[in-house]
Amino acid sequence: MFDFDATLPLMAVQFLLLMVVLNAIFFKPLTKAIDERGEYIRSNEVEAKERLAKSEALAQQYERELAESRKQYQAVIAAAQDDAQKISAQKIAEAQQEAQAQREQAQKEIDEQKQAAMHTLEQQVEALSRQILDKLLIGV
């Protein structure tokens, strides 16, 4: 079936030589390119993970700062509302005191006018009483 003559070793040598040449020309550069590509991908992946971690840390920091600013502006709003409420209560109290003072002044004026009217009526009643008395005394 197979002839083991001089061509078999020559074919084996040719095959080995072809393997050495292919290894030097094709396989080594190809594996080097594949290794470099793999290293490039790994380094990009590590860099991407680092960037992702940094961005997540920044996002958390911004969230904390945002929460702090919300607390601060809510405190400012609450303080402003308290101040406004105090000022409004003070203005209402002042207005009520002024209204009370005006009521008292009006009541005092009314009482004075009432006293003046009563005094005038008393004088008129006295004058009319004298006139009636004079008419009765004269007419008798």
Image (spheres, grey):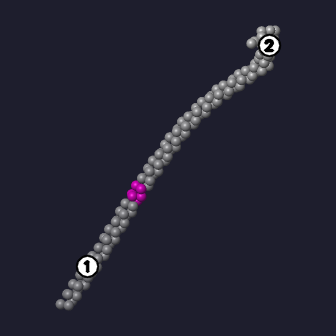
Task: State the residue in front, 81 or 68.
Answer: 68
Q: Is residue 131 above or below residue 104?
A: below
Amino acid found under the numbered disc labelled 2: Met
In the image: residue 100, left or right of residue 60: left
Which residue is depicted at the point 75% across and 12% down? 2
In the image: residue 58, left or right of residue 14: left
Amino acid found under the numbered disc labelled 1: Glu
Task: Identify the residue position indicated by label 2 in the image.
Answer: 11
Stretch of the chain drawn in magenta: 92-98
Q: Secondary structure at mark 2?
A: helix
Q: Residue 44 appears at what percent x and percent y?
A: 67, 28
Task: Identify the residue position indicated by label 1 in the image.
Answer: 126
Q: Residue 36 appears at what percent x and percent y?
A: 72, 23
Q: Residues within 10 Å of mark 1 (few under 14, many from 20)?
A: few
Q: Is residue 47 above or below residue 120?
A: above
Task: State the residue in front, 65 or 90.
Answer: 65
Q: Residue 88 appears at what percent x and percent y?
A: 44, 53
Q: Secondary structure at mark 1?
A: helix
Q: Is residue 94 magenta?
A: yes
Q: Is residue 80 magenta?
A: no
